[in-house]
Amino acid sequence: MKYKIVTNNPLVKESENICFVEGSFEDVLIKVRDLVYEGVELISHPLGASMRMLYSPYRSILVGKKNNTINPSHIETIENSIINYKKNLKARKVDWVHADDYALIDNELLKSTLRDLEVY
């Protein structure tokens, strides 16, 4: 197994190599943080490519294999992602009205990332 998908997206739930999180976007970030502190490497960035995606109720993040050492850069990335997520959600709440659209977008972004992994 080259990767694992950490997600709370119901559209991704039946995929292979899943760590499904029953919870929020923030809960997914916290789960990834815990894995990174165990030595698991980050493959995809914890936050989406646009500010709008921060208001999504769903997030899928790719993580890799567990290493013998913890990567300080990955720790910094996930910790800063959690801080930025919380900071941005103070001004605006999760957009549940468009949850189905966000689930679809998250799933498509995940598929794109997985295709990119196959190239490399």
Image (tube, grey):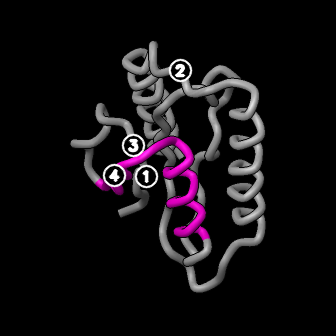
Whether residues under marks 4 and 2 lie with C-beta atoms below 8 angstroms apart, the answer is no
Whether residues under marks 3 and 4 lie with C-beta atoms below 8 angstroms apart, the answer is yes
Question: Which of pointers 3 and 2 indicates the residue nearer the eye?
Answer: 2
Tag 2: residue type?
Asp
First in sequence: mark 1 vs mark 2:
1
Against 34, residue 89 (above or below) is: above
Real-space Cα separation, disc 3 to disc 1, in angstroms: 7 Å
Whether residues under marks 3 and 2 lie with C-beta atoms below 8 angstroms apart, the answer is no
Q: Which residue is labeled 4 in the image?
A: 20
Callout 2: few (<14), some (14-19), or many (20+) C-alpha neighbours within 10 Å? some
First in sequence: mark 1 vs mark 4:
1
Question: Mark number for residue 6?
Answer: 1
What span is in magenta? 17-36
x, y (%) of residue 4?
Answer: 40, 57
Q: Secondary structure at mark 1?
A: strand
Whether residues under marks 1 and 4 lie with C-beta atoms below 8 angstroms apart, the answer is no
